[in-house]
């Protein structure tokens, strides 16, 4: 007889409901902080709230903008920069919602007053004309014009949305065109004009920014390359694309025919995945970025592989009928084959015994006296009559009408380990059999800890993340739910089995990657490539080799060191070689290989022209650059300012003017020009700095930390210092790499109440 007990099932149902009802998110406040003294329309907002019974993360939205997903440990959070309207008040809405419990949320609304000054100091009718955006540099041409009522206005300064000076211009030059206005990353941009030598005489203008992405969101060259079938229902594939502006997001979502496959990091590209066959021969893959300007996606259809051979059996089903005796019962059997013209008959086995040979036209087949094996799980096997045959097995529950043993016993447990799913988890396929079904459920313990309760009909079960205990062997125990113990009063109808863990556990690591290039073959433009490395815990017998993001091939680890005799030159000075353990995208390392010289004439930069403009109060100045180059082997060049890489620009934009070249503080500044990815093709120029002898000096810095607040890992920090010739009324503070804000010098000495500890 089958014993029943609903208590475990009820407990499983009630627990998540109770957790959802207990989630609370309340007392949400929004505080405007860190206003920009240069751009009065720019500000940040700090969100703070209380919470209980929540999940690990929450998301923030408002005014049609998705501000992102955050951990609760980050509260309070700072959003921004945000931008107000210079001519009218702006309402900002903030909706904070738990990532798991969508009825656990709170809202707050703030009113931001108009941030313009109405042209009261002589600036009237400020307007702009927007040109197209360059998606490589994220800049665009902007023409600025305005009317001025005061004849004393001689010069004005233009600032971008983030407060960077773009130059000082005479009013006689109006309208002024700025060739490389930096995009702020939002749907709307803002420009600020300030009259020189007139404090607080500024006006800002908000305007529609051009589309700075390639296409709708900067995703291009999206490809899906299907691979081999893994089974009759899954196949491998490689997903790859290129993206501009990945500084705005470092992850993407992947969908197949509208079903989310996961969220992945951009640095995992090209991404190996396993897709489930869904019957669609031309599925549609989609990748999406969640950007500050909204969700943007790109789709691509591809041809899925046919993973079923002509005689393949699918949809094998059985349905038990009434018992015909105390050891037999009726059974319906039905199934489909991929190509009905390829199969005309089939054979069937029950619990290992042959039951007969039948024609396909006899389906669905009824077996009136299927012999019971005396256990809760019985098995059927079907094979097609052609040669070679296709076969499929199915496990099913015996019907209730059979006389199960009143003393429960689990007869055996089978454990099959699969791939590792983390550095301490792996896949386990569990199956078992018993002589009493209990209440129709079974409970699984993993290394002495209850893992979960399952219906008997779910067996065999695949546990995706079985927890490793850290040793060579793990232990699993299975118990029948609600059953009567067997002859051993301590057994409680349970059985335990110890098994060897897979060798992929522990952190996969690639070390000592060595890449060597031989001499170039000028005729074929190829060279020998030798790759070798050490590895630990690979969890796989193969590795993937990439060159500049493109898969070269998959090779056995036992072939190391690997030699590719005819590796093609990429036309650049450097090839980025990356190796990853196959199907382990988080176990990779890369090497920048300096290519052998395959050019008859080397790259050469000459006729460099440098012209520096006037220094601004921010310590930057415009710098005009032009030069000639032979055989660059690349379409871009790099500019370094005083030893630091400043940016990468297209050669076809020469000559260029950098509006905000940073001064070093020394009498002479240094600019270095290199062809992109060609460190041997460079030219350096030293020139007098227009910002020299400005005399700004910070000294006598005093820091006085207060008592630590262990609740949020912060402490108060008193700051004081002396400064001469600052050229500005404000100073900025960074804490362990985190920007803390902009503060007035007249506030010194100054105390930051919640200075974040670094943990060092």
Image: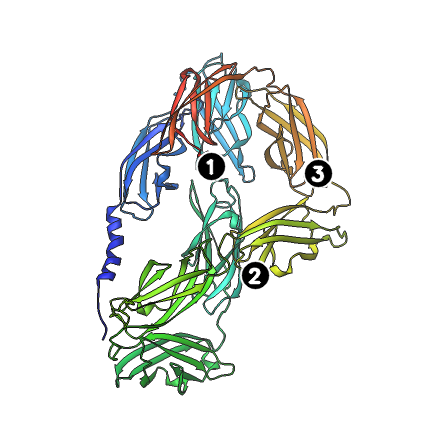
Which circle's residue, 2 or 3, is located before the other in the chain?
2
Q: CA distance from mark 2 to mark 3?
A: 38 Å
Q: Of helix, strand and loop, which one carries label 2?
A: loop
Comparing 442 with 96, the one in front is 442
Residue 386 or residue 735, whichever sits in front: 735
At 29% from the left and 47% from the top, the residue drawn is: 102
Extreme residue in the top direction:
152
Instruction: Give the quadrant of residue 671.
Output: top right
Of circles 1 and 3, the one toward us is 3
Q: Which residue is mark 1?
A: 185
Residue that numbered label 3 is attached to: 680
Q: Position of residue 695 (x, y in %)?
A: 56, 15
Q: Which one is nearer the viewer's eye here, 352 or 553?
A: 352
Which sits earlier in the primary sequence, circle 1 or circle 3? 1
Mark 3 Cα-neighbour bin, 10 Å: few <14, some 14–19, many ≥20 = few
Residue highlighted by disc 2: 541
Task: Give the quarter of the figure containing the N terminus.
Answer: bottom left
Q: Number of marks in the image?
A: 3
- Label 1 to label 3, Cα distance in Å? 34 Å
Which residue: 38% across, 59% down?
Answer: 447
Image x and y of residue 327, in percent? 29, 84
Q: Is residue 38 above or below residue 294?
A: above
Residues at circles 2 and 3 in contact by the CB criterion of under 8 Å: no
Left/right of residue 388 with respect to residue 450 in the rendered view: right
């Amino acid at each position: 007889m089958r014993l029943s007990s609903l208590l475990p099932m009820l407990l499983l149902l009630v627990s998540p409901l109770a957790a959802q009802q207990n989630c609370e998110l309340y007392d949400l406040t929004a505080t405007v902080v860190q206003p920009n003294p240069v751009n009065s329309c720019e500000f940040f907002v700090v969100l703070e709230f209380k919470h209980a019974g929540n999940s690990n993360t929450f998301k923030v939205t408002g005014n049609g903008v998705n501000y992102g997903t955050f951990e609760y440990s980050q509260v309070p959070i700072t959003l921004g920069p945000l931008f107000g309207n210079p001519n009218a008040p702006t309402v900002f809405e903030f909706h904070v919602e738990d990532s798991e419990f969508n009825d656990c949320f709170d809202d707050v609304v703030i009113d931001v007053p108009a941030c313009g000054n109405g042209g009261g100091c002589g600036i009237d009718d400020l307007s702009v004309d927007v040109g197209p955006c360059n998606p490589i540099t994220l800049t665009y041409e902007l023409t600025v014009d305005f009317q001025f009522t005061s004849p004393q206005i001689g010069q004005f300064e233009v600032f971008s949305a983030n407060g960077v000076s773009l130059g000082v211009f005479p009013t006689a030059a109006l309208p002024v065109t700025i060739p490389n206005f930096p995009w702020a990353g939002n749907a709307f941009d803002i420009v600020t004009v300030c009259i020189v030598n007139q404090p607080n005489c500024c006006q800002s203008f908000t305007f529609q920014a051009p589309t700075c992405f390639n296409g709708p969101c900067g995703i291009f060259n999206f490809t899906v390359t299907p691979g081999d079938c893994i089974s009759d229902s899954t196949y491998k594939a490689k997903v790859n694309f290129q993206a501009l502006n990945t500084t705005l997001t470092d992850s993407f979502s992947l969908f197949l025919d509208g079903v989310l496959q996961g969220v992945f990091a951009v640095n995992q590209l090209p991404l190996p995945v396993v897709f489930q066959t869904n019957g669609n021969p031309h599925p549609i893959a989609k990748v999406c970025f969640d950007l500050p300007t909204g969700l943007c996606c790109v789709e691509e259809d591809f041809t899925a592989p046919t993973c079923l051979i002509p005689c393949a059996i699918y949809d094998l089903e059985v349905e038990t009928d009434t018992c015909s005796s105390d050891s037999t019962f009726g059974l319906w059997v039905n199934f489909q084959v991929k190509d009905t013209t390829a199969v005309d008959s089939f054979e069937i086995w029950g619990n290992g015994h042959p039951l007969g040979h039948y024609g396909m036209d006899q389906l669905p087949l009824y077996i009136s006296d299927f012999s019971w094996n005396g256990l809760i799980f019985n098995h059927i096997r079907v094979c097609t009559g052609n040669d070679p045959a296709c076969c499929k097995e199915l496990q099913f529950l015996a019907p209730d009408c059979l006389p199960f043993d009143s003393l429960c016993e689990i007869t055996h447990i089978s454990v099959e380990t699969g791939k590792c799913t983390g550095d301490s988890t792996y896949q386990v396929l569990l199956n078992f059999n018993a002589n009493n079904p209990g209440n129709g459920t079974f409970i699984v313990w993993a290394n002495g800890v209850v893992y979960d309760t399952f219906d008997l009909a779910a067996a065999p079960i695949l546990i995706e993340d079985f927890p490793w205990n850290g040793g060579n062997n793990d232990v699993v125990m299975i118990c029948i739910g609600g059953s009567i113990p067997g002859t051993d009063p301590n057994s409680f109808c349970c059985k335990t089995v110890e098994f060897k863990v897979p060798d992929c556990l522990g952190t996969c690591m690639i070390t000592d990657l060595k890449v060597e290039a031989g001499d170039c073959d000028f005729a074929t433009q190829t060279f020998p490539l030798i790759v070798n490395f050490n590895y630990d815990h690979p969890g796989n017998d193969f590795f993937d080799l990439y060159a500049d993001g493109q898969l070269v091939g998959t090779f056995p680890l036992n072939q190391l060191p690997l030699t590719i005799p005819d590796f093609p030159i990429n036309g650049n000075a450097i090839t980025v070689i990356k190796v990853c353990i196959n199907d382990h995208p988080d176990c990779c390392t890369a090497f920048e290989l300096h290519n052998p010289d395959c050019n008859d004439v080397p790259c050469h930069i000459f006729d460099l022209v440098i012209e520096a403009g006037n220094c601004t109060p921010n310590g930057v100045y415009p710098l005009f650059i032009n030069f000639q180059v032979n055989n660059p082997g690349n379409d871009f060049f790099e500019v370094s300012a005083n030893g630091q890489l400043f940016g990468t620009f297209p050669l076809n934009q020469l000559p260029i003017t950098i509006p905000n070249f940073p001064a070093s503080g020394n009498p002479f500044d240094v600019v270095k020009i290199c062809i992109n990815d060609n460190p041997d093709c460079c030219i350096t120029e030293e020139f007098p700095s227009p910002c020299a002898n400005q005399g700004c000096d910070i000294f006598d810095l005093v820091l006085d930390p207060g008592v630590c607040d262990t609740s949020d890992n912060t402490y108060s920090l008193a700051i004081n210092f002396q400064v001469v010739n600052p050229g500005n009324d404000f100073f900025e503070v960074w804490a362990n790499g985190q920007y803390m804000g902009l503060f007035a010098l007249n506030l010194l000495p100054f105390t930051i109440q919640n200075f974040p500890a670094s943990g060092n």
